[in-house]
Amino acid sequence: MPRITTTEEFQDLFDIDANLNRLVKNIELLNYINPLNIASEKKKFYSAKYNYEPQFKYPKIRFNGYKLHRLFFSQRLERIEDDAIRQLYEDIIYEYSGLIECIETIGQGRKFYFNSLKSFGTPTEKDIENATFILRFDDSDFNEEMLPMYNATEARDYFDEFSKRYDFKYNIKISNNLSAAAMVLNNTQTLVLRKSHKYSLNQLKVLANHEIGVHMVTTFNGLEQPLKVFSNGFPNNVETQEGLAVYSEFMSGCLTIERLKELAFRVIAVDSLHKGYSFSDTFHLLHSQHKLNRDKAFAITLRVHRGGGFTKDHLYLRGIRNVYKYAKAGEDLGVLLTGKVSQEYIATINKLQALGLAIAPKYFTDAYINNDNTDPNLDFILKSLK
């Protein structure tokens, strides 16, 4: 393993990295995008026979966007001599600037949607074809592990036990204001669980492998790196990180066709934003046309319409397609676990490691060691994705 290069040899790079680290602490998008009044608006929506546009409220912004933009773009990137490393930091500044614009416009309808498009894109024709392909498969097999029976406190106990296989310490918080069943807040090393949710045993396995086995692993690997950018996130890291997380579900044997269909429905729902669908339009598309039960349809519609149109959710399916192909080609998954990184910067990560500016991952996702998937249909689906 190459030695870690001292800050003296790359002083300008470390100075810029430290500056960005100070600035980026305020812009964890997930702190702002989850509505504060989900339960009351859901009740109104159901009472109105699904023909009501929810009026969500969001947390107040705790930073000055204009000042942050100015500080990001005042960095003297020309002082970074290596072209690939300088390009990475230039891309990062544009990425973080885009996230500021997203946060500043949460709750402002199409204005937020267009900023979300800049940061996360929208499904391509291939993505929609992949989603439609997955929806053809039957997921009706009954399995007791799919029955929702565990509350958030019992889920916390399960995750505490699961985490003993990794020697890092993180916080678990239970919250009412969450659109997902669980999520990881990177900057505070916190796993947040939704208080009102009932978890099935399969979902506990999925979330443990997804949130702890990947998202927490890359959070703590990122914190070990000499450069803070590994912790704060590379451009387009969502696609790769979510792909790695769903791949860990597959390898640990808890990925189901029902779960893959959920990712496919997210693509369909994000595409409905592009078509100008309202909240109730997207809900009717999922519930009436695709026969998804109303709570699942509401959850997906909420994830996609929060803020004014949040397009991030289509990246899960594209991410698992790319990571599956990468892993099946025998490529190194470790390099993608070094922090909040993305596949398109693998060559730059390798260069940083060769220069002693990055290290190999301290923690490795244990689901990747053995393939415990026993469903040939899942292999067939993932192989077939375009």
Image: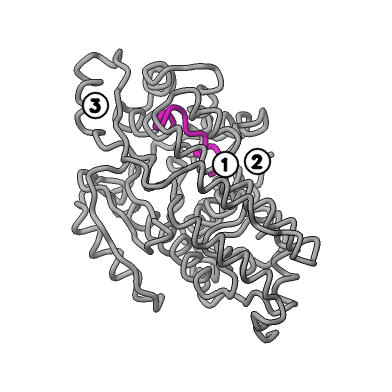
Image x and y of residue 103, in percent: 45, 39
Pointer 3 residue: 41
Q: Which amino acid does label 3 sit on?
A: Glu
Residue 358 position within the rendered picture, expressed as x and y whole percent measured from the top left? 64, 74
The amino acid beneath tag 2 is: Leu
Residue 385 badge: 2
Q: Say what amino acid the circle numbered 1 marks.
A: Gly
Q: Main secondary structure of the magenta part?
A: helix
Helix, strand or loop at mark 3:
helix
Q: At 38% across and 64% down in the image, what residue appears? A: 189
Mark toward the start of the polypeptide (3 vs 1): 3
Quarter of the figure with the C terminus: top right
Mark 2 surroundings: few (<14), some (14-19) or many (≥20) residues within 10 A: many
Secondary structure under tag 1 reads helix
Residue interval drawn in magenta: 304-317
Residue at 55 percent of width and 71 percent of height: 369
The answer to which of 360 and 371 lies nearer the viewer is: 360
User: Which residue is rendered at x = 25% and y = 14% of the image?
Assistant: 49
Who comes first in sequence, dot 3 or dot 2?
3
User: Which callout, 1 or 2, points at the residue further toward the start of the chain?
Assistant: 1
Given contact means CB atoms under 8 Å apart, are the residues at marks 3 and 2 in contact? no
Magenta-drawn stretch contains 362: no
Q: Is residue 273 above or below residue 178?
A: above
Quickly name the residue at label 1.
98
At horizontal 74% and vertical 77% (from top left) the residue drawn is: 355
Spot occupied by residue 53 in the image (x, y as percentages of width and height): 32, 18
Classify the position of the N terminus by image quarter: bottom right
Nearer mark to the viewer, of 3 and 1: 1
Query: Along the horizontal axis of the image, is 242 left or right of 386?
Result: left
- Decide: few, some or many residues near mark 3? Use Cα within 10 Å; few <14, some 14-19, many ≥20: some
